[in-house]
Image: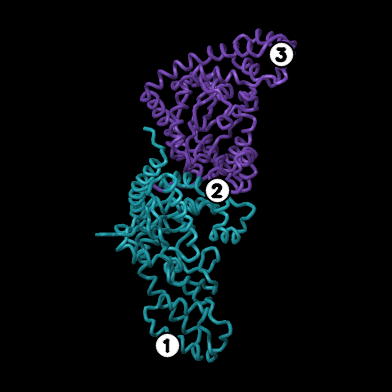
Chain colours: A cyan, B purple
Amino acid sequence: MNKKQIILTGDRPTGPLHLGHYVGSLANRVALQKDHTQFIMIADAQALTDNYEHPQKIHDAVFQVALDYLAVGIDPNLSTIFIQSMIPALAELTLYYLNLVTVNRLKRNPTVKTEINQKGMEENLPAGFLMYPVSQAADITTFKATLVPVGEDQIPMIEQTNEIVRTFNRLYKTSILVEAQALVSKIARLQGIDGKAKMSKSLGNAVYLSDSMDVVQQKVKQMYTDPLHLKVNDPGNVEGNVVFSYLDAFDPDQKTVSELKEHYQRGGLGDMTIKKRLLEVLNAFLQPIQEKRKVLEQDKNYVMNILQKGTAQANEIAEKTLQEVKSAMHLHYF
Amino acid sequence: MNKKQIILTGDRPTGPLHLGHYVGSLANRVALQKDHTQFIMIADAQALTDNYEHPQKIHDAVFQVALDYLAVGIDPNLSTIFIQSMIPALAELTLYYLNLVTVNRLKRNPTVKTEINQKGMEENLPAGFLMYPVSQAADITTFKATLVPVGEDQIPMIEQTNEIVRTFNRLYKTSILVEAQALVSKIARLQGIDGKAKMSKSLGNAVYLSDSMDVVQQKVKQMYTDPLHLKVNDPGNVEGNVVFSYLDAFDPDQKTVSELKEHYQRGGLGDMTIKKRLLEVLNAFLQPIQEKRKVLEQDKNYVMNILQKGTAQANEIAEKTLQEVKSAMHLHYF
């Protein structure tokens, strides 16, 4: 098979994955793995840059994330799943790349800037957090990835990576490092159940792939709809209405969803009814995932063996790239 | 033998070593290696943080520095000489430590601040340079060094290291990392031949251990003495007089040096005479070093084998520490 493009993607393991991850990336990975060489990194080292006080949480989440990957259909025979902290070459490459980036450049990175503001880290900014885009550049270039699936807000990360690639290749008169292209997701980000723009663990507004049906039911019940839609007969708004945005994302019968939207907008369709439908849709979507997840969860050895094998494969490639990089930098002695 | 203290020391390989290195550290290492476990690191990765544009220079200097080490009497059976870039654990530890240090803290480091000013790097400060104290903390703690020979101006580096040690041990509820003590050199720094406070390659005022006798003669000839000591019979100043400061450092007959100083101060002793004596002293000092150096230079394999063996020993210890660190951070999966 001629898998032309190499993809590097992954997640910070800070807890189990949610529907937002599914819509934003997991579904895409399952589709892409057939025709691409796909590396999926469980970025525990990167997760530590803003969770260094909670290493046990990161450790435990690695298994949870692996379960989610396999449960949604990421196939270890088609994708290489590996653990970042077990690839020593990534750390070495990061350090060499840090010489090629100025502190001011890192501070100007829009993604990092936003995160620093959000986390209120201005004064106590850990050095490791400031330079995580350089660590990402190492992740991407180590595997010579040509495609990196990202959200709109992550494009500056790819730009930073490509800057490093160009500087390295120019400075060390080589062409071993490869520029990557951002594969920007066309799918709108999934809202949180509270109606906020982003579903996220830290905002407490997520539906997890591993949530029990009872929990899903509760979350659907409290979902933000249209606060002005008080009586069933009132016209309702579907814009910003979480129930409809989830129906858009998960209901296989989009024709009916269109009809429901029209009905809701002209009045006469209650929140209870659309929530009931969403619950059925989510149940149907989650059930096979959760069944697979439960089986895998019982067989931790099997899952960890997959990670071990993937990590060994990733290490082989990473070591090769590192040796090329070190050769270009005249760092070979014997 | 009970070698209680562990020493970590080393040099950035940017060129061959000079008399300033000998007085400031090499002599000390030769003395210390008998009763201490001494690791001597050729810090090529650190040298790259401000020489990333000249990797070939760093590469070539590694061999030169190794020659100097062996020529002055560093004994590979008593000291472990190794190459920094060949110890992957150092890079991994650096990245984990970077999470424990804020960017502001790094910017306040007095040693780094001074260097940034000297090099005029304020605006274009490479991230790798800003964080090299964290990389030093990795060097020191990897070998669990308890003693680090430093100049007065390097004490903040040890403080930074010990801060990281305390933070790490507290955060990860462990005691595996060990605080180090600065072993501050009591010997005054050797002046450059131009009378400047510091002999340094970049100031172009150094006498190298590998300088030919012709070159040494030239350098002694142009040495700064007392600019007001115009006639032989004039009283001369010995303070800041480079010839006398070198006689202090290298003349085995310090009684005669005292007498010469008195004579010079009361007048009647010419610069030619004291320079002639210094040249003899330096010749006597350098000759056996250079003879040994020449033999070693012919046998590059022998020297590289020593580095290879030392690097392998260092790697064994570094890997052990890294595994302890990762265990404390819950970064073990299989």
Q: x, y (%) of residue B102?
A: 60, 48
Dot 3 amino acid type: Lys
Q: CA distance from mark 1 to mark 2?
A: 52 Å
| Residue toward you, A146 or A48 | A146
Label 2 packing within 10 angstroms: few (<14), some (14-19), many (20+): many
Residue B267 in the image: above or below residue A71: above
For the point 59% across and 58% down, the residue is: A116
Q: Quick one: which residue is furthest to the front in this view?
A: B231
Q: x, y (%) of residue B86?
A: 42, 36
When asked about the image quadrant of residue A246, the answer is: bottom left
When asked about the image quadrant of residue A250, the answer is: bottom left
Residue B128 in the image: above or below residue A266: above
Q: Are marks 1 and 3 on the same chain?
A: no
For the point 37% across and 49% down, the residue is: A175
Mark drawn on residue A259: 1
Q: Report which residue position mark 2 lands on.
A: B99
Q: CA distance from mark 3 to mark 2?
A: 63 Å
Give the structural element (helix, strand or loop) at label 1.
Answer: helix
Using the image, name the chain to which the residue with label 1 belongs. A
Q: Are marks 3 and 2 on the same chain?
A: yes
Give the structural element (helix, strand or loop) at label 2.
Answer: loop
Q: Quick one: which residue is furthest to the left in this view?
A: A1
Pointer 1 and pointer 2: residues touching (CB < 8 Å)? Answer: no
Q: Report which residue position mark 3 lands on.
A: B231
